[in-house]
Amino acid sequence: MFGSIGIQELILIFIIALLLFGPKKIPEIGKTIGKAI
């Protein structure tokens, strides 16, 4: 679905999401990503 995204890219995206949304939003984002995959 995402093409060839590796672990490093996922970690980078997670860090960016953490900076943008803050720690409180991460569980919601995790659920959304979980549904998308």
Image (cartoon, rainbow, N blue to C red):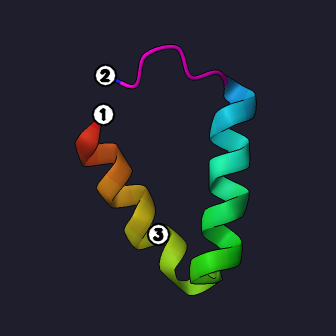
The quarter of the picture where residue 23 lies is bottom right
Camera-side residue of 12 and 23: 12
- Residue 6 vs 8, above or below: the answer is above
Q: Residue at x 64, y 54 (%)?
A: 14
| Circle nearer the N terminus (1, 3) | 3
Q: Nearer the viewer, mark 3 or mark 2?
A: 2
The quarter of the picture where residue 20 lies is bottom right
Q: Secondary structure at mark 1?
A: loop
- Residue 17 vs 37, above or below: the answer is below
Question: Residue flagged by tag 1: what amino acid is it?
Answer: Ile
Question: Residue flagged by tag 2: what amino acid is it?
Answer: Met
Boundaries of the magenta span: 2-6
The residue that mark 3 highlights is 27
Q: CA distance from mark 1 to mark 2?
A: 8 Å
Which quadrant holds the N terminus?
A: top left
Q: Residue at x 68, y 34 (%)?
A: 9
Q: CA distance from mark 1 to mark 3?
A: 15 Å
The residue that mark 2 highlights is 1
Q: Secondary structure at mark 2?
A: loop
Characterize the local packing of mark 2: few (<14), some (14-19) or many (20 or more) Cα atoms within 10 angstroms.
Answer: few
Q: Nearer the viewer, mark 1 or mark 2?
A: 2
Query: What is the chief secondary structure element of the magenta stretch?
Result: loop
| Circle nearer the N terminus (1, 2) | 2
